[in-house]
Amino acid sequence: MNGAREMKFDPADFLTKVGLGRRLVQVKAKHAFFVQGAPADCVFYLQSGRAKLTVVSKNGKEATITLLTAGEFVGEESIAGAAGLRMASATAITACLAMKIERDEMIRMLHAEHAFSDLFLKFLLQRSMRTQADLIDQLFNSSEKRLARILLLMAEFGKVGEPETLIPQITQETLAEMIGTTRSRVSFFMNRFRKLGFIEYNGRIRVHKSLLNVILHDQLPEQGNASRPTLTEENEPVKSVRRAKKVLLS
């Protein structure tokens, strides 16, 4: 039979090729995809580059709440109910290439194509799991361990393929915001990690796999492999809860 066959929908094609209601956009480093308070009228799919989500409190305090890598959606809140306003700002850390999908087109495709809705649902579940992990990290881990986890996430340890051990440029102030501590403490921990051979730090940060020991086994010289974390001023649950609330609600 020579009749034309209906082409099977490919989510990868949809997210990489321009079409009705979607176009490719290039965002330079330190430029915004969107800003907090702007109309939430589209979703971005990050094809390449790194970005971050930040929120600003009423008194002007800014905090970084998550880092974004290629293969992630940005601005998914735009399809939650009636179109509203952005709850955070998305800013490129490095030069980014993204597919900008208009809200109506995104909703249409989620209804029309099961393969696409499955892909998007998987992303939402992964984002939810990471948010839970971030909260647990804030509540129960020391700031030193939280810093180690952030560096490993930025280096993409645990993802398919080889990790990118040289992570994008990021300031100690931003790292401090993300883990809920001071820049001086971040500087102290970074110098410690460098002396222990976990990272190389000379303008850009290169993360070594040995940093996983801090997360998995609490392996620091004065602790020993068999030691367990104790309740200190750094990781006392009550103070961690207060710090987490301050970061999340301020």
Image (cartoon, helix red, strand yellow):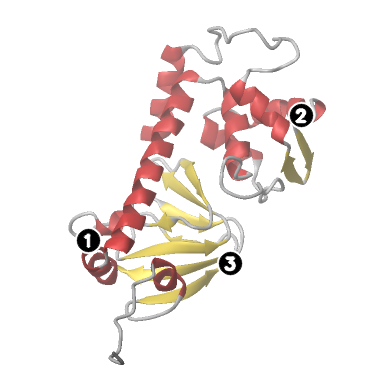
Q: Nearer the viewer, residue 46 or 34?
A: 46
Q: Which residue is mark 1?
A: 83
Mark 1, Cα crowd under 10 Å, few <14 / some 14-19 / many 20+, is some
88 displayed left or right of 160: left
Q: Amino acid at mark 1?
A: Ala
Q: Nearer the viewer, residue 193 or 30?
A: 193
Give the quarter of the figure containing the C terminus. top left
Is residue 131 placed above or below 160 in the rendered structure? Answer: above
Q: Nearer the viewer, residue 32 or 206?
A: 206
Q: Residue 6 sits in which quadrant? A: bottom left
**Which label's residue is closer to the chain start, 3 or 1?**
3
Q: Amino acid at mark 3?
A: Lys
Residue 28 - label:
3
Secondary structure, mark 3, is loop
Secondary structure, mark 1, is loop
C-alpha separation, residue under disc 2 versus residue under disc 1: 46 Å
Residue at 32 percent across and 62 percent down: it is 115
Residue at 42 percent across and 69 percent down: it is 15
Q: Which residue is mark 2?
A: 191
C-alpha separation, residue under disc 3 versus residue under disc 2: 31 Å
State the image coordinates of residue 8 (x, y, percent, origin top left): 34, 74
Give the quarter of the figure containing the N terminus. bottom left
Residue at 65 percent across and 23 percent down: it is 214
Mark 2, Cα crowd under 10 Å, few <14 / some 14-19 / many 20+, is some
190 displayed left or right of 246: right
